[in-house]
Image (spheres, rainbow, N blue to C red):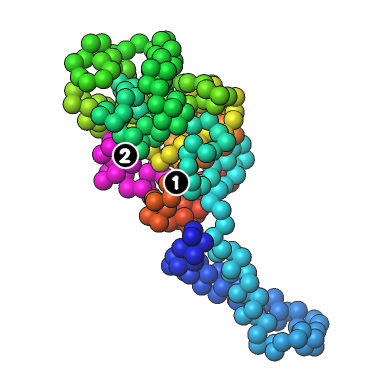
Amino acid sequence: MQLTRDLRNKRFWSGLAIHGLAALGIFSVSLSLFDLFAPNTLGKFDMPETLILPAMALVYAIWKSWPYPVEQQYSSPDTRVKLVTGDLFDQNANLVIGMSDFFDVDTPHIIAENSVQGQLLSRIYRHDVSALSSDLNVALASKAPIEVGVTKPGNSTRYALGTVATIRRSRTHYFCVAYTNMDENNNVSTSIGILWEALERLWDEVRSRSNGDPVAAPIIGLGQSGMSTVLPIQDAIRFLILSFIFASRRQRVCEELIIVIRPQDERRINMLEVQDFLQSLKKS
């Protein structure tokens, strides 16, 4: 459970101690002044006076440190970012789908069945490879390929990294963004620079095609791209948030970014730290 995990987090307890001690000092001065101008009033409370201050400080500290849902509303830009644990395809939002620069879709020999891309094929297209390939080809018709006739299993046409093929199906936009380079053996790789540029182009596409509706994204770079050693999961979340906020400050991207965490990854994430990070991005 997320709540019990956060309550075991030392960040919660250190925050509780800091807020508690700060409140104790402020309340001590305040109640001393109150008692000076209204003597004997505190004695009317049904508890020893020595317990009033600690009780008030504890309540305040718990209120300030309690692990609320991890989300933040921003006024400049007018948008919101939140983290949820669950299934990407259950979100009531447009979805971000990471792909390679060949936009291969065939599973399991080229694309892993349990990947987000593999789930797009199985859950949205009911394993209909030709239908998904057809929709991608239509979406890519206006994009100029950088290589044609590459000898490799699967697709043979390569597009520039950062290319976004947008599919609309059942009133949902699927923003298929190429952020990994695939070699002739169908091994994929990427880099921080490529990933940042791909996200910038993704937000441009979301801005122009989503009509401001929320977009949900997985944590980018955790799959076969090899980025997990360079960009651990906590940093990957911050990277995704920063990219979205910077793009939104230039021009609003959409109403809300929902970062969807797989249940098996949740225990690896310090949610209280992410909550503090989101708050730190609010412009004064």
Q: Mark 1: give few (<14), some (14-19) or many (20+) Cα within 10 Å.
A: some
Labels 2 & 1 near each other (Cβ < 8 A): no
Q: Residue at x 25, y 29 (%)?
A: 109
Q: Dot 2, crowdedness within 10 Å: few (<14), some or many (≥20)?
A: some
Q: Is residue 214 left or right of residue 103?
A: right
Count of numbered marks: 2
Residue 56 figure quarter = bottom right
Q: Quadrant of residue 100?
A: top left
**Residue at 65% of width from left, 85% of height from top?**
51
Q: Main secondary structure of the magenta part?
A: loop
Question: Regarding mark 2 in the picture, which secondary structure is present there?
Answer: loop
Q: Is residue 237 left or right of residue 207?
A: left
> Label 1: which residue?
261
Residue at disc 1, secondary structure? strand
Please determine whether, in this image, residue 164 is positioned above or below residue 195: above
Q: Is residue 221 above or below residue 8?
A: above
Residue in the image at 35% along x and 28% along y: 99
Query: Is residue 235 a member of the stretch shown in magenta?
Result: yes
96 vs 58: above or below: above
Q: Position of residue 147 (x, y in %)?
A: 25, 13
Kindly identify the amino acid type of the residue bearing the numbered disc 1.
Answer: Ile
Q: Which residue is mark 2?
A: 223
- Let me know if residue 146 appears in the view: yes
The residue range painted magenta reads: 221-238
Label 2 is placed on what type of residue?
A: Gly
**Label whose residue precedes the other's in the sequence (2 or 1):** 2
**Drawn side of residue 198 relative to residue 21, left or right:** left
Q: Measuring 46% from the left and 55% from the top, which residue is drawn there?
A: 271
Q: Where is residue 221, by image quadrant?
A: top left
Residue 155 is situated, as x and y percent measured from the top left of the image, at: 28, 17
The answer to whether one can see residue 204 in this image is no
